[in-house]
Image (cartoon, helix red, strand yellow):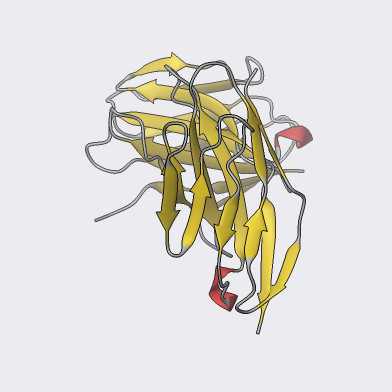
Amino acid sequence: GNSVTQMEGPVTLSEEAFLTINCTYTATGYPSLFWYVQYPGEGLQLLLKATKADDKGSNKGFEATYRKETTSFHLEKGSVQVSDSAVYFCALTNTGFQKLVFGTGTRLLVSP
Amino acid sequence: GAGVSQTPSNKVTEKGKYVELRCDPISGHTALYWYRQSLGQGPEFLIYFQGTGAADDSGLPNDRFFAVRPEGSVSTLKIQRTERGDSAVYLCASSTEQGHPQYFGPGTRLTVT
């Protein structure tokens, strides 16, 4: 079946540090990959996506590259801010299916 | 424009009672999804509507759960004979026919006592 595995949190960083949140997936066919973010007290928001191998999704300084050979979609940011503190979810949809399959989420805490 | 709205934002009910959760999608979005998020977990898919019909209900955990979307807009998730294990945040999302991105509502926090 389809599944997503994320690194456990919390990830605690100082402002301006480099961020990596690991995500690997298992899927049949040709999944599309997503990162969603949930800020405190807010709903889930799409952060970025990639729909085919070697695509790079980017938004708000965050990037993730769809790596089919390693079945990974790691989230990176070069310099985090306090305002990036949130829970980040990696997710996929598979060919012909609309439902999102989510990982368990990784909490990021950024201190000044 | 208005986003996805869900009502109520919080619902506390006693074990065995019936509850209805409402979702108002973004105007013009033909696809609507329900997910359930337990504490410390990612959202889990429940059901997906394309228009008025349920295109995929494979995530509904048992026959106590039912959802409708009679006019292809507002949807109601119905839970009969609630159990404490049903306690979670129920999320609704909508999208255009192409399926993505999905826009999520703020959720309804259901607590079964």
Query: In the image, is residue A50 above or below residue B32?
Result: below
A52 horizontally vs B46: left or right = left
A3 horizontally vs A44: left or right = right
Which corner quadrant of the image does residue B51 belong to? top left
A110 horizontally vs A54: left or right = right
Q: Locate the N terminus of chain B by quadrant.
A: bottom left
Rendering coords of residue B87 (x, y %): 71, 40
At a point 65% along the width and 85% down the height, the residue shown is A112
Question: B12 or B53: which is nearer to us?
Answer: B53
Q: How many marks?
A: 0
At a point 76% along the width and 34% down the height, the residue shown is B85
Which corner quadrant of the image does residue B96 belong to? top left
Whether residue B8 appears in this view of the structure is no
Which corner quadrant of the image does residue B59 belong to? top right
Rendering coords of residue B15 (x, y %): 75, 34
Query: In the image, is residue B81 above or below residue A88?
Result: above
At a point 52% along the width and 41% down the height, the residue shown is B91
At a point 48% along the width and 21% down the height, the residue shown is A30
Question: B50 or A80: which is nearer to us?
Answer: A80
Question: B80 or A24: which is nearer to us?
Answer: A24
Q: Locate the C terminus of chain B by quadrant.
A: top right
B53 horizontally vs B88: left or right = left
Whether residue B4 appears in this view of the structure is yes
Rendering coords of residue B98 (x, y %): 30, 29
Query: In the image, is residue B111 above or below residue A82?
Result: above
